[in-house]
Amino acid sequence: MSFAWPWQYSFPPFFTLQPNGETRQKQLSAWCALALAYSQRHRLPAMTVREAQDSPLFANRRLQRILWGLPPPPPGAPHMSLLPPPAALSPALPSQIGERLLNPRPGKLPLESIQVVLEELRKNGNLEWLDKNKTSFLIMWRRPEEWGKLIYQWVSKNGLTNSVFTLYELASGDDTENEEFHGLDETMLLRALQALQQEHKAEIITLDDGRGVKFF
């Protein structure tokens, strides 16, 4: 099933943060909701700001082509296809000129605006920066303690307390294939297990082939 983009994603001003405080806050809320929904649908792992900038989440290539007066790409064309050089583009329509003055790449959220959105997610408890320079991050569409609860429910339901698992077995093993946490990024998996460890329901341990966890 393909991802259902919200209506704002096809609305050019959505890709330019507005100066009015009330409008800007509504816009940031919409961006945060989109980032969480997109991350959940695609099970996004930890990523860099640069990767985010080039992802479909923050760049509507089809909208970019329409705004530049180009025909949309045919069905099945690569989403990340590049625009031709500016000299090859048709003149802007008058209604588009103001938008281009604010955002020279309409249809793509500028880097500084992406950073504002990511920081808003962090303030809401849905993002963790993974380095002090804020170049990589993890979007948490479900918080670590919520993942921990799901994992422990599975452990309890199957009578697996006092059992030891590798991180690979939990995230990628056959026994968890039908569970929501199957395929969970290792960074988030560790955060979830650390939350359980704080509740004295688990202990993260070192095994010969890597890290594991024992449940209580």
Image: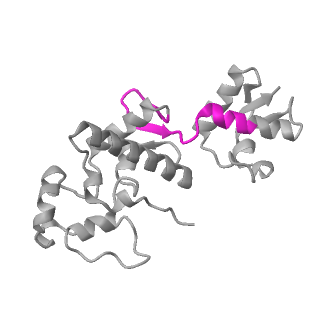
Colour option used? one colour
Disc tally is 0
Q: Quadrant of residue 73?
A: bottom left
Query: Residue 135, can we see it?
Result: no
Residue 97 horizontal side relative to residue 58, left or right: left
Residue 35 horizontal side relative to residue 158, left or right: left
Q: Quadrant of the N terminus?
A: bottom right
Q: Residue 57: where, in percent of width, then height?
A: 40, 54
Residue under the point 25% across and 54% down:
13
Residue under the point 39% across and 60% down:
7
Q: Quadrant of the C terminus?
A: top right
Q: Would residue 134 be counted in the magenta stretch? A: yes
Residue under the point 64% across and 31% down:
145
- Looking at the image, the residue that sits furthest to the right is 159
Q: Is residue 20 above or below residue 3?
A: above
Residue under the point 79% across and 41% down:
154
Residue 182 horizontal side relative to residue 216, left or right: left
Q: Would residue 96 be counted in the magenta stretch? A: no
- Looking at the image, the residue that sits furthest to the front is 22
Which is more toward the observer, 19 or 111? 19
The region drawn magenta spans 126-151
Q: Residue 170: where, in percent of width, then height?
A: 73, 42
